[in-house]
Image: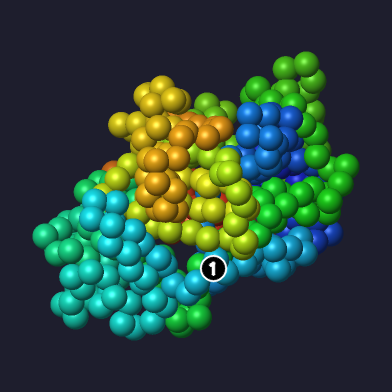
Amino acid sequence: MASPVSVDHVHVIGAGLAGLSCAVRLVAAGRRVTVYESAGHAGGRCRSYRDSRLERRIDNGNHLLLSGNRSAFAYLSEIGSADSLVAPDGDGFPFLDLQDGRRWTVPVGLRCLLKVPGGRWRDYLGGFGLYQAGGEATVAGLLDRRAPVYRNFWEPLAMGILNISAEEGAAHLMGAVLKEIIGQGLAACRPRIVREGLSESFVDPALARLKDRLLFNRRLRSLEFAADKVSALNFGDEKSALAEGESVVLAVPPTVAGALVPGLTVPGDSRAIVNGHFRLDSGREGVSMLGMVGGVGQWLFVRGDIASVTVSAAAGLVDETEEDIARSLWAEVAVALGLGEAPLPPYRIVKEKRATFAQTPEQIKLRPGAVTAWKNLYLAGDWTDTGLPATIEGAVRSGHTAASKALKPV
């Protein structure tokens, strides 16, 4: 049997957050890294761009982090942008009921559920149930759906974290978030939002560190194998043979990974997200957020003169026309911001039909780990078995896990 060979060059396929976090960590460990991205930009679903219709720079989607997201903040520290996330205006998590106009704020503290309309001490039992959830349980199956706190807190929280209805969503993934965050103490529960944009926080600083190690518009067509290792990368117009001491990290969507790796089982079902961005007549100081119940949108974020609404688990919305979606969402934004009968302003609707894999108990069983049957091939992505939902935290942690595996001799 040949002796293990130290890895000195890692090929990272994909420049989303999983690929970037993996590459940054490998470079910090002194390894030679090449990152290949099929698109002309990095960041995947976590990026910013200038929209010609709004004449503003916007994020393709909205992302809320918590101060206890240790992997995400470790990555931000590594790329020098940890201070680019800020606390939104106010304290805690503000909500609005679009049906009756009630507003409330869920504070960061032990009495949080008591501040939700209709909240009772017995509602904490539902949270304990999520802590102990088994692999087959759904969020709704462990909570009292008749209790006001279900509609006013648990349901929008579950949809925001899992991008799926509480009736379908895997309870143990919600429990994993609660364990990890609350287990660090109440200080880990505070909301954090990017001050400027997703690219400015998560992508651009990473690209500055990776410099000339990135190759854009390079779509991997196939992998070639010899014995128990990947032997070559086929990009169609060019083939790159791998030498001893070279490894590969696939940080691509699950369907792509499943097509590239023989026999790999991956989650095949997905869920949509729709984001609506609106240009307001006047800007607002700071960055604010608002949870909404009783309507179409679930979370509203306002930065400057751009108001952005997120609709998770948007299967019933994603096939509607952009104008119809915009009018529905704008009506809710106008109520939330007290704008009265303001006419529909310039808008941009972003549809992501396969935003995340479907985080059901059945699909979660199909998540593979970072290690594959080939000694020099590893997987990264929020769809891999991180034990966490498909979020920024999950994507970054998968990249860190793949990096640690890829550093080992093969």
Report the residue at 69% width, 63% height from top.
Answer: 84
Using the image as rendered, state which of residue 281 and residue 70 is in the foreground: 281
Can residue 116 be seen in the rendering of this structure?
A: yes
Can residue 356 be seen in the rendering of this structure?
A: no
Disc 1 element:
loop
Left or right: 20, with 251 as reference point: right
Residue 364 is situated, as x and y percent measured from the top left of the image, at: 36, 47
Residue 114 is situated, as x and y percent measured from the top left of the image, at: 25, 78
Using the image as rendered, state which of residue 185 and residue 318 is in the foreground: 318
Left or right: 15, with 129 as reference point: right
Report the residue at 58% width, 40% height from top.
Answer: 279
- Residue 158 occupies which quadrant of the picture? bottom left
Question: Label 1: which residue?
Answer: 89
Report the residue at 77% width, 64% height from top.
Answer: 80
Q: Amino acid at mark 1?
A: Asp
In the image, residue 229 sits, relative to residue 28, either above or below, namely above
Using the image as rendered, state which of residue 326 and residue 265 is in the foreground: 326
In the image, residue 173 sits, relative to residue 109, either above or below, namely above
Residue 382 is situated, as x and y percent measured from the top left of the image, at: 51, 48
Using the image as rendered, state which of residue 198 and residue 259 is in the foreground: 198
Report the residue at 39% width, 57% height from top.
Answer: 291
Residue 93 is situated, as x and y percent measured from the top left of the image, at: 42, 67
Residue farthest to the front, as pictured: 341
